[in-house]
Image (tube, rainbow, N blue to C red):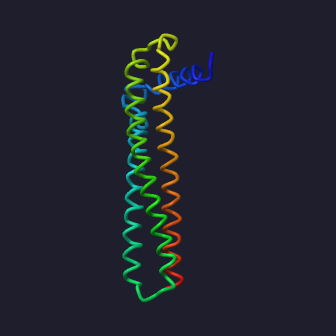
Amino acid sequence: MTLRDRSMRNFEKWWTAQGAGPGTSGGEAPIFTPAARFSLLFDALKLIGTGNGAGLLGSIAGLYYFASRAELHAPLKASAIFFFVGLLVFALSIGAYISGLLVATSFLDQYVVPHTDLSKVPSEALNRGVDGLMLLTASLMGAVLSWGCFIIGTSIGLYAVCWLA
């Protein structure tokens, strides 16, 4: 058994364990179902992108507002660069999220939900399922990187405006 087969088998066990439906917690569905987790990740991605976009606009506005203060130009430009990089990473991350979710859910709908034996799943379909999970993981890493750009850009901007101004 290869590492890929073991990984998919463990994923299938985890996925079926997450399928606790209504009636398991006093008649109510669990709050953090897999669908809710993916929705929270998408909302987090949107918030990070919004923060980076607002930070970029704020840095540009700060450059115009403090046009006569040359000592503020370098930190505000650096802040704008970090926000811009955060926006680029956000765009890649949202694309990876949507692509990964489409690939992973199509694999799950076709092979895992009908409880198909993994030994009967074609190798290329299994590879597509793993690719979907890898894209979702890349999306999560991109979100963390974009959030880091937001924190750095905000820190530089606050330093420029609060301590240098």
Q: How many marks?
A: 0
Return the x and y of residue 53 as percentages of the image width and height. 38, 62
Give the position of the N terminus as an image quadrant: top right
Name which residue lies at 53% across and 76% down. Answer: 159
Provide residue 30's location: percent of width, then percent of height: 41, 33
Residue 129: x percent and y percent? 46, 26
Q: Is residue 33 left or right of residue 1?
A: left
Q: Is residue 85 above or below residue 63?
A: above
The residue nearer to you, when weighing 31 against 153, is 153
Residue displayed at 40% across by 19% down: 113
Image-based side of 130 in relation to 67, left or right: right
Q: Position of residue 88 (x, y in %)?
A: 43, 55
Q: Residue at x 62, y 19 (%)?
A: 2
Residue sitting nearer the eye, 99 or 13: 99
164 displayed left or right of 59: right
Look at 53% across and 84% down and name the residue there. Answer: 164
Q: Is residue 124 above or below residue 131?
A: above
Q: Is residue 145 above or below residue 41?
A: below
Residue 40 picture quarter: top left
* Direction bottom: furthest residue: 68
